[in-house]
Image (cartoon, rainbow, N blue to C red):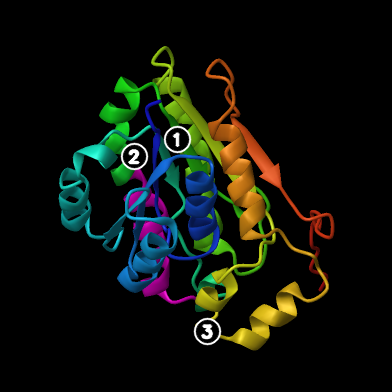
Amino acid sequence: MTLKTACITGASSGFGAATVARFVAGGWRVVATGRRAERLQKLVEQLGADRVHALAFDMRDETAMRAAIAGLPPEFAAIDLLVNNAGLALGTAPAQQADLAQWKQMIDTNVTALATITHLLLPALIERRGAIVNISSIAGTYPYKGGNVYGGTKAFVSQFTQNLRTDLHGTGVRVSSIEPGMAETEFTLVRTGGDQAASDQLYAGAAPITAGDIADTIWWIANLPPHLNVNRIELMPVSQSAAGLQVHRG
């Protein structure tokens, strides 16, 4: 039996690391990308060099991305599934007080890099009638204070998914967007610059989504019969719901 191969971005932690483990457990090979080489190497050591190939580069560095993909060994080069997981939120300030550099980093990572790696891998995905799973967020649908550019980038991811689906009509390539709500990973630590107390407070008592939940969802989508496509799936913990509109009086 020919093993299938997934390329999973942002694989050094959170959703990405859990998804690498889930797919290896299911019998796939995985190309795992991320900035933190030491964490990727631990995945290789834990799961096996015959099943995981690590590519350490910053998603914002297109030259490094192209070189890494071009240099894949033959046994990992035939990509059947792209999981666009790499992304981040930075800062919680309202737009008028936000750091422009943080805005640009979110756009470069969540939008430009995602579009770039997708474009690079489309020929292989079309040839193999593969699949693309993009990790968006409910932040792309429901606005909230401090969400500004982060929410905007995730709205892009959701719409890009649907437009890819239209363009790839007839190729057999499946394209899906997963839009999670509150999930406990390193997300809030990154967003707050390492504030563990803020992260703990956010998730306390909420029974949030876990990285394993998202990995299982990606696995389910990827292994559906080839005539089925999940266009988008929105996931929230039961403890979370839309908060409604706000009104300023005065």
2 or 1: tag closer to the N-terminus: 2
Rendering quarter of residue 151: bottom right
Q: Amino acid at mark 2?
A: Thr
Where does the image place residue 9, in percent across and percent down from the top left? 40, 53
Is 98 placed above or below 211 here? below
Is 171 placed above or below 105 here? above
> What secondary structure do most residues of the magenta stretch adopt?
helix
Secondary structure beneath label 2: helix
Residue at mark 2: 118
Secondary structure beneath label 1: strand
Q: Which residues are magenta?
A: 98-115
Q: Amino acid at mark 1?
A: Ile
Residue at mark 1: 132
Distance of label 2 from label 1 (alpha carbons): 8 Å
Residue visible at 54% across and 57% down in the picture: 18
Q: Nearer the viewer, residue 13 or 145?
A: 13
Is 161 placed above or below 94 here? above
Q: Amino acid at mark 3?
A: Gly
Are the residues tagged 2 and 3 within 8 Å (C-beta)?
no
Residue at mark 3: 194
Where does the image place residue 158, in percent across and percent down from the top left? 53, 41
Distance of label 2 from label 3 (alpha carbons): 30 Å
Distance of label 3 from label 1 (alpha carbons): 31 Å
Left or right: residue 33 versus residue 140 is left
Regarding residue 138, the answer to whether it shows in the image is: no
Are the residues tagged 2 and 1 within 8 Å (C-beta)?
yes
Can you say which quadrant of the picture contains the N terminus?
Answer: top left
Where does the image place residue 41, in percent across and percent down from the top left? 34, 66
Q: Is residue 103 magenta?
A: yes
Left or right: residue 23 versus residue 4 is right
